[in-house]
């Protein structure tokens, strides 16, 4: 299957894959029916964050492109556009799988050039999306980072992470580990409307509680907060209070922003799903990709003040470098059983 691998500026050496023209196509069956998996061999797997970025980490690993969580607002959708696929249905059903991700990571961590810096996962698409139940790449990456005692963090919306709870607890004994859950709302109607492929938000809160009980520090991103859908003070406080009670070490809120081709995709969806909110969005985004500062600060202030009232004032954030002596790795589980966690 011919694809256009044009998103070169985010990848080392200017290319995504050794062969930029060909991906091996696999049609999903059983629990993965309706999906297509595009197998590729990544040239590199540890990617440097652009110098101009304000992210609190320097390196990322993303074993998948595209995401079956199908969040209507996902900032990563335009990456499929760059690949010659559409940012709507293709992004949700045609998942690029970097099948050599674990092997590449092992090699890159062994390189004398690698300094053991923190690695963040989930910065593009969810590392625990449905495909992970089939391919185990995220588990293999966690095992590899644990063996190297290399610090890492994971951002996810998925309860599939509980499959690896014991592995993460083991990793926590060897290096700096942090999990962050994306929980934009506890409002079930808002969740069904905007994140149709994700586990229910209350189950994510429970997953946070279970990981915290194992000594794994978990933060929460209430993000993105959607105008007229999940941005009321009551909705925001509800999420903060539930996550604080579950043991979150940090909680922050981020207002929706719409950059590039995502803007047209999201507004097209809005016209069909919530035409009553089109006017509000036009006003909020009349100056570009970001809402006005006053609205962004309102959301941040509500979340921050509620978190402080609940005793959540921060937590460890992306600290540490590689340590010595690796522990033994764990065995992989059953993919069908893993998918039932979703």
Image (tube, helix red, strand yellow):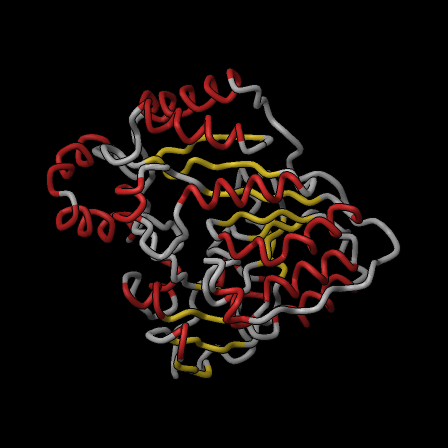
Residue 277: percent from left, percent from top = 15, 37
Q: Give whichever of 266, 154 is nearer the camera.
A: 154
- Tell me: residue 277, above or below residue 196: above
Q: Quadrant of residue 112?
A: bottom right
**Figure quadrant of the N terminus:** bottom left
- In the image, taking residue 259 as reference, residue 125 lies left or right, namely right
- In the image, taking residue 246 as reference, residue 184 lies left or right, namely left
Residue 195: percent from left, percent from top = 33, 50
Residue placed at 65% from the left, 39% from the top? 213
Residue placed at 28% from the left, 65% from the top? 89
Residue 203: percent from left, percent from top = 45, 46
Residue 223: percent from left, percent from top = 41, 38
- Tell me: residue 4, above or below residue 123: below
Q: Quadrant of residue 44?
A: bottom right
- In the image, taking residue 181 as reference, residue 32 lies left or right, namely left
**Figure quadrant of the C terminus:** bottom left
- Tell me: residue 331, above or below residue 249: below
């Amino acid at each position: 299957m011919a694809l256009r691998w044009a998103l070169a500026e985010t990848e080392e050496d200017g290319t995504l894959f050794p062969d930029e023209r060909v991906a091996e196509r696999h049609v999903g069956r059983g629990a993965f029916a309706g999906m297509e998996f595009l197998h590729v061999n990544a040239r590199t797997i540890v990617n440097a964050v652009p110098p101009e970025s304000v992210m609190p980490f320097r390196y990322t690993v993303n074993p998948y492109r595209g995401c079956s969580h199908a969040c209507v607002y996902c900032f990563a959708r335009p990456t499929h556009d760059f690949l010659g696929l559409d940012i709507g249905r293709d992004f949700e059903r045609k998942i690029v799988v970097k099948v050599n991700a674990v092997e590449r990571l092992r090699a890159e961590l062994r390189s004398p050039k690698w300094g053991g810096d923190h690695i963040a996962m989930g910065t593009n698409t969810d590392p625990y999306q449905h495909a992970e139940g089939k391919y185990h790449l995220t588990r293999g990456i966690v095992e590899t980072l644990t063996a190297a005692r290399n610090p890492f963090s994971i951002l996810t919306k998925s309860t599939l992470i509980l499959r690896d709870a014991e592995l993460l607890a083991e990793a926590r004994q060897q290096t700096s580990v942090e999990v962050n859950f994306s929980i934009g709302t506890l409002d079930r109607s808002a969740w069904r409307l905007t994140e149709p492929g994700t586990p229910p938000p209350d189950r994510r809160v429970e997953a946070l509680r279970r990981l915290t009980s194992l000594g794994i520090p978990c933060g929460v991103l209430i993000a993105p907060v959607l105008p007229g859908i999940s941005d009321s003070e009551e909705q925001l406080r509800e999420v903060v209070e539930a996550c604080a009670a579950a043991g979150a070490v940090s909680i922050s809120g981020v207002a929706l922003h719409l950059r590039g081709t995502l803007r047209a995709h999201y507004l097209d969806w809005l016209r069909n799903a919530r035409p009553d909110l089109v006017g509000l969005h036009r006003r909020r985004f009349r100056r570009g990709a970001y809402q006005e500062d006053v609205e962004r600060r309102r959301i941040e202030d509500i979340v921050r003040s509620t978190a402080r009232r609940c005793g959540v004032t921060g937590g460890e954030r992306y600290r540490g470098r590689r340590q010595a002596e690796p522990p033994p790795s764990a065995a992989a589980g059953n993919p069908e059983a893993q998918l039932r966690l979703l």
